[in-house]
């Protein structure tokens, strides 16, 4: 089974046919997904989706590019909601110097503040980091006392840096980019780090894998990402799916919660998978 560790089904791209997509999850081998908030308005949207669908969990946080309207009191409102039953992480938070807006000092301030919020709530973090490798690494090192684990989502840096994040205890989020012709660096990263540190993600509606590149993405395309990773590692696709599913469960501590809904509403049994837990 495949668990999508990063999606945005609250996006308007899904407003017409979300129930139909979720109905197709079982035949594509998808058991669940985390909808990740990015701005103030999406906080309640992802919570509502988690209530409406047994397959969905929620991550609450403010994306660096959307942190300008944040205030301490607004953040406290988010903090209260972290205790709702299906909230599994704080995110997406981080630094984005690609757009460089709002200014870097403001981005850093709210990144640190949300890292500490995650620590207080004892939740892992979902890190968005673009064109900001050094500052991201430095802040994560400085804030290690405030550390509940997490994932570097949509990983885009060097294989060497990935090894460093892995040594710090992070998972590396791999999605459609790994199938792109110009995704060479991510392919190398996948070959360099242990499979036990890779989680599958869509970032849908964005980042659809080849041959759907440029189209609307969804979790239904994740088997294409698993297949590409299997080819890169020269192992069976089933092994990639099995190991990354265990990784996702460890990352978000899903076993401490209700299992993602299985086919036909049957409780899922994955004793066979437990054997391979390291
Ligand atoms: Ni995202």
Image: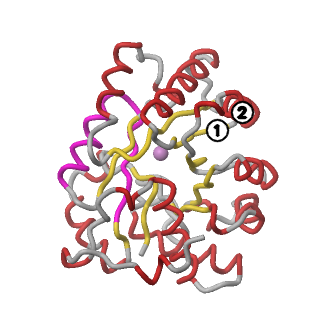
Q: Please name the residue shown 78% across and 55% down the image.
A: 159
Q: Looking at this view, name the residue that lies furthest to the right.
A: 160
| Distance between mark 2 and mark 1 Cα atoms | 17 Å
- Tell me where residue 150 appears, x and y as whole percent: 56, 46
Q: Is residue 36 magenta?
A: yes
- Tell me where residue 5 appears, x and y as whole percent: 46, 56
In the rendered image, which quarter is residue 23 located in?
Answer: bottom left
- Tell me where residue 221 appears, x and y as whole percent: 44, 70
Q: Residue 269 versus residue 10: which sits nearer the camera? A: 269
Label 1 sits on residue: 130
In this rendering, the count of numbered labels is 2
Task: Answer few, some or many: residues within 10 Å of disc 2's Cα (few below 14, many 20 plus, some between 14 and 19).
Answer: some
Which scheme is used to colour this image of the protein? secondary structure
Dot in front, 2 or 1: 2
* Mark before the other along the chain sequence, 2 or 1: 1
Query: Ligand 1 within 8 A of label 2's CB?
Result: no
Q: Residue 79 versus residue 48: which sits nearer the camera? A: 79
Q: Are marks 2 and 1 in contact (CB under 8 Å)?
A: no
Task: Answer few, some or many: residues within 10 Å of disc 1's Cα (few below 14, many 20 plus, some between 14 and 19).
Answer: many
Q: Secondary structure at mark 2?
A: helix
Dominant secondary structure of the magenta stretch?
helix
Q: Secondary structure at mark 1?
A: strand
Q: Residue 121 versus residue 242: which sits nearer the camera? A: 121
Question: As displayed, is residue 154 above or below residue 175?
Answer: above
Residue 266 appears left or right of 31: left
Q: Please name the residue shown 55% across and 72% down the image.
A: 277
Label 2 sits on residue: 141
Task: Tell me the number on the disc at residue 81.
Answer: none
Q: Which region is colored magenta?
A: 32-52
Query: Ligand 1 within 8 A of label 1's CB?
Result: no
Quarter occupied by the C terminus: bottom right
- Tell me where residue 227 appears, x and y as whole percent: 57, 78
């Amino acid at each position: 089974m495949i668990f999508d560790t990063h999606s945005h089904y609250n996006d308007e791209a899904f407003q017409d046919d979300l129930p139909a997509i979720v109905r197709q999850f079982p035949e594509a081998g998808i058991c669940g997904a985390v909808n990740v908030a990015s701005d103030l308005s999406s906080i309640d949207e992802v919570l509502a989706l988690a209530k409406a669908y047994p397959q969905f969990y929620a991550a609450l946080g403010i994306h660096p590019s959307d942190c300008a309207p944040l205030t301490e009191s607004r953040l406290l409102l988010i903090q209260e909601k972290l205790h709702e039953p299906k909230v599994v992480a704080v995110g997406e938070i981080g630094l984005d110097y690609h757009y460089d807006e709002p200014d870097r000092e403001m981005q850093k301030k709210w990144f640190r503040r949300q890292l500490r919020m995650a620590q207080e709530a004892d939740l892992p973090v979902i890190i968005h980091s673009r064109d900001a490798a050094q500052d991201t690494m430095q802040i994560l090192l400085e804030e290690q006392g405030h550390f509940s684990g997490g994932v570097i989502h949509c990983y885009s840096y060097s294989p060497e840096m990935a090894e460093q994040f892995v040594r710090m205890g992070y998972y590396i989020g791999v999605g459609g980019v790994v199938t792109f012709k110009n995704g060479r660096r991510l392919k190398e990263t996948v070959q360099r780090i242990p499979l036990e540190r890779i989680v599958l993600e869509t970032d849908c509606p964005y980042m659809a894998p080849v041959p759907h590149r440029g189209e609307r993405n969804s979790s239904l395309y994740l088997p294409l990402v698993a297949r590409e990773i299997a080819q890169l590692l020269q192992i069976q696709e089933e092994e990639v799916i099995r190991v990354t599913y265990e990784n996702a469960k460890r990352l978000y501590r899903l076993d401490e919660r209700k299992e993602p809904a299985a086919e036909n509403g049957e409780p899922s049994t994955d004793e066979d998978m437990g054997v391979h837990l390291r």
